[in-house]
Image (cartoon, helix red, strand yellow):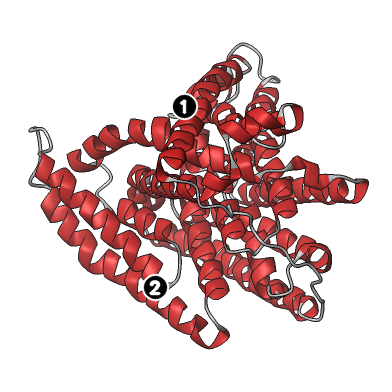
Amino acid sequence: METSAAERRSWWRTPLAAYALMIAGTIGAFFLIRLYGETLTATQLYLVDSGTKAPTTSRVLFHVLLALAAVIAVGRLLAALFRLLGQPSVIGEVMAGIVLGPSVLGAIWPEAASVLLPKDVAPELGLVAQLGVILYMFCVGLELDPDLLQKRGPATIAVSHASIAVPFLLGALVALGMYPRYAAQNVSFTVYALFIGAAMSVTAFPVLARILADCGMMRTPLGVMALTCAAADDATAWCLLALVVGVAQAEVASALYVIVSAMIYVLVMFWMVRPALRRWSNRFHAESLPATAVATLLLLLMLSSLATELIGIHAIFGAFLLGAIMPHDSRVAHELNVRIESLVTMLLLPAFFALTGMRTELALLQGSVNWLWCGIIVVAAIAGKVGGTVAAARLTGLTWREASSLGVLMNTRGLMGLIVLNIGLDLEIISPAVFAMMVVMALVTTLATTPVLRLLARPQAGGGIEENFSGGI
């Protein structure tokens, strides 16, 4: 027993020291980058075109409904096509907005694009999109399993945070070159670098879960570890983004107030609201969830979103946090997710895809210099995510093939990446050109996941991906 205890103490000591060194090194490296970056001067002046006209209510309603109908129809067709190509259907849904926007339909048939997605209804479409994203992030929070993080141990958390730290630092380095060329004059380098780093660090937990299910890997050791890492990754990345948004929206003097208020709110939610929700949810077992219970949870969702919006971060953080503190395995969480997920993904999120398509103008990337920076962003994002994950996974004992596969899975950004980018564009942290570059990055990294994963599974002949990755980790 003494030997076993000594071994456990030795096992904990080395990973904890390495983990502390990684966190301290990341913070120190970022401050060194910031020290030089603050000497740079931004030269750009840009505004996000959210529509300048004030159309009549009937015309707005007509175009919003038309845009939703078009994106839903095209999204379903493209989703079926991408599924045939072995890709997650969400890629087709995202591409629907881009196809109907200025980058494709607007370039081929501008008149049709101006009818389907006119710029003057962007504010109203944006409100529908924001509501869809708030509900979607609530569903993402409901799907997180905090117990899974505890079961997999600190090694998995270390892998997850390494997959955030490395792309975050690479993003900050890329920001050194982009800031003088693409940043607005009223955006500080610190905010710009924090946002670029955060946008490169995020992993799309829901899209990753869908890819694992399509590949039959949900119950494999590698699949469980990937989901665990992605859950911790999402939670950490959204906390980091909340910090960025709070600093970006606040004056220097009030930034500390935003950060402290957000921390207090998180503590209240975990220490007071979470136990109350657990006791309340235990009242519902076999019976169907009553309408009053659904209304109560939706009211809490709105209040939590309002609270984070008033604090000075974004409403989606309140939605995500409320979902995350709900008892994951309760009947309340399961039934509520079933009731609203289809409505959100099939009706409200298409408004977000349409808005993203309207904002993505690939024509802004004319010239070799813009495409070069786009390529640098893609390479840095892939190298940071995959490299950080593989290095940490190898240190925890995974084989090269398992570590590489985990890195590829963590490189999935998808819809979560687009949500982050739209927040940056709304706050005018990034320009429309950089937004287009980052959208390309999010799509490329997500599109590469399934084919590269299948390629890594190929050396072990005689089975599919699920058989080749069913070994222990």
Callout 2: SS:
helix
Determine the CA span between mark 1 and mark 2: 35 Å
Horizontal and vertical percent for residue 418?
Answer: 58, 46
Question: For the N terminus, which image quadrant?
Answer: bottom left
Callout 2: few (<14), some (14-19), or many (20+) C-alpha neighbours within 10 Å? some
Q: Position of residue 441 (x, y in %)?
A: 70, 43
Residue labelled with disc 1: 69
Identify which amino acid the numbered label 2 is placed on.
Ile
* Residue 370: image tag: none
Left or right position of 347 against 214: left
Q: Name the residue at the front extreme.
A: 56
Left or right of 263 in this view: 63: right
| Residue at x 44% of width, y 34% of height | 62
Q: Position of residue 41 (x, y in %)?
A: 81, 76
Picture quarter containing residue 290? top left
Query: Which is closer to the viewer, label 1 or label 2?
Result: 1
Q: Nearer the viewer, residue 376 or 44?
A: 44
- Compared to 308, does 446 lie above or below? above
- Badge 1, how many Cα within 10 Å: few under 14, some, many 20+? some
| Kind of residue sitting beneath label 1 | Ala
Which residue is more in the foreground, 421 or 35? 421
Q: Nearer the viewer, residue 239 or 190?
A: 190
Whether residue 35 can be seen here: yes
Residue at x-position 87% and y-position 48%: 372
Q: Earlier in the sequence, mark 1 or mark 2?
A: 1
Q: Is residue 470 shown to the viewer in this render? A: no
Numbered circle sitting on residue 311: 2
Q: Is residue 207 left or right of residue 21?
A: left
Element under disc 1: helix
